[in-house]
Image: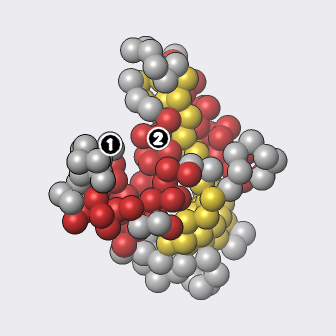
């Protein structure tokens, strides 16, 4: 297998984020050389951040090799900044509490995401959402398909 990086685009979406009847979706595009893989899913009663994180988790779970670099693109500042600024180091040191001593939101997703990312060579890259980046737009379309399936 080529050592060229695996390119990943993830996106999450949530409709009705503040209502009890909200629906969320996540989408993933994986590209390695000429090979593409796409998948998506959805949930009820969720948030946009949870869907963004779920997309990242599902993407990394789908990558079976551990020795190929991964370039994971996300339009989520929440996720990318956590990795680039290493927020998780303090969270772990403070027993999953924020600087203001409040529990870290989405710990149940941060833990598996961090576990996966630490076993791989993952570079998190922030992309501007809805800016015409082809694979990011496709991940968004997939996230919307995930929402549609939950709605039906």
Q: Are marks 1 and 2 in contact (CB under 8 Å)?
A: yes
- Of all residues shown, which one is farthest toward the right? 132
Judge by depth and name the residue closer to the eye, 96 or 37: 96
SS state under label 1: loop
Where residue 56 appears, x then y in whole percent? 48, 54
Q: Residue at x 25, y 43 (%)?
A: 102
Q: Residues within 10 Å of mark 1 (few under 14, many from 20)?
A: few
Q: Is residue 48 left or right of residue 139?
A: left
Q: Is residue 39 left or right of residue 108?
A: right
Q: Is residue 83 left or right of residue 7?
A: left
The residue where tag 1 is placed is 105
The residue where tag 2 is placed is 49
Examine the image and state in which quarter residue 74 appears: bottom right
SS state under label 2: helix
Judge by depth and name the residue closer to the eye, 147 or 97: 97
Q: Residue at x 36, y 74 (%)?
A: 119
Judge by depth and name the residue closer to the eye, 96 or 61: 96
- Of all residues shown, which one is farthest toward the left? 95
């Amino acid at each position: 297998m080529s050592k060229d990086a695996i390119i990943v685009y993830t996106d999450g979406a949530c409709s009705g984020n503040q209502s009890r009847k909200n629906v969320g979706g996540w989408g993933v595009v994986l590209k390695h050389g000429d090979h593409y893989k796409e998948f998506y899913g959805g949930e009820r009663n969720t948030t946009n951040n949870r869907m963004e994180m779920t997309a990242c988790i599902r993407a990394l779970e789908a990558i079976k090799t551990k020795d190929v670099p991964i370039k994971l693109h996300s339009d989520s500042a929440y996720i990318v900044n956590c990795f680039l600024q290493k927020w998780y180091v303090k969270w772990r040191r403070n027993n999953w509490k924020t600087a203001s001593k409040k529990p870290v939101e989405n710990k149940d997703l941060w833990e598996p995401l961090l576990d996966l990312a630490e076993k791989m060579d993952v570079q998190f890259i922030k992309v501007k959402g809805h800016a015409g980046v082809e694979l990011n737009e496709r991940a968004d379309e997939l996230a919307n398909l995930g929402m549609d399936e939950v709605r039906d």
